[in-house]
Amino acid sequence: MEDITVVVAELLEQLASARDVAPDAEPSQIIVSSLDQMRFLVGLEERLDVMLDIGDVLPFDLSGRDALVASVRELLAESGVLS
């Protein structure tokens, strides 16, 4: 599996470009709506070739890049992708 930190950074850069935001901006400035979170989720699933079980609430912590990576790792573990 690809390095989660790299995947998250590349997806943030891609979303930032689409929103015309600086690629090194905080996640909360790049992912500002539930639609952005869904785009991020779909990007994760495509890049990692997995299907993630998220329930009703998108679980991404947008308070910082490290927090976002940690929340992605937790989601992957809860979905049985990471052990």
Image (tube, rainbow, N blue to C red):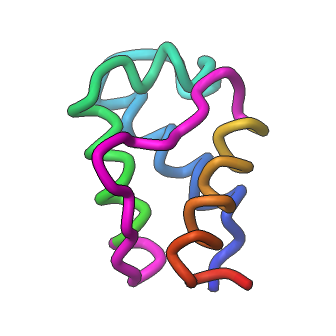
Taking depth in this image into account, of 74 and 18 the one nearest to the observer is 74
Taking the view exactly as shown, the residue that stands out farthest to the left is 35
Residue 5 in the image: state x and y as whole percent.
71, 56
Q: Quadrant of the N terminus?
A: bottom right
Q: Position of residue 20 (x, y in %)?
A: 34, 17
Q: Is 48 placed left or right of 66 in the picture?
A: left
Q: Is residue 26 left or right of residue 3?
A: left
Q: Position of residue 74 (x, y in %)?
A: 66, 59
Seen from the viewer's position, the closer of residues 65 and 24 is 65
Magenta range is 46-65
Q: Quadrant of the C terminus?
A: bottom right
Q: Quadrant of residue 16?
A: top left
Per the picture, the main secondary structure of the magenta-coloured stretch is: loop
In reply to whether residue 52 is colored magenta, the answer given is: yes
Would you say residue 56 sits in the magenta stretch?
Answer: yes
Which residue is drawn at the image coordinates 67% and 64% (left, top)?
A: 4
In this rendering, the answer to whether 30 lies above or below 29 is: below
Q: For this rendering, which residue is in front, 56 or 58?
A: 56
Q: Is 20 or 75 nearer to us in this picture? A: 75
Q: Residue at x 39, y 83 (%)?
A: 49
Q: Is residue 4 left or right of residue 50?
A: right
Which residue in the rendered view is the most extreme toward the front? 56
Where 26 falls versus 12 (above or below)?
above
The answer to which image quadrant residue 15 occupies is top left
Q: How many marks?
A: 0
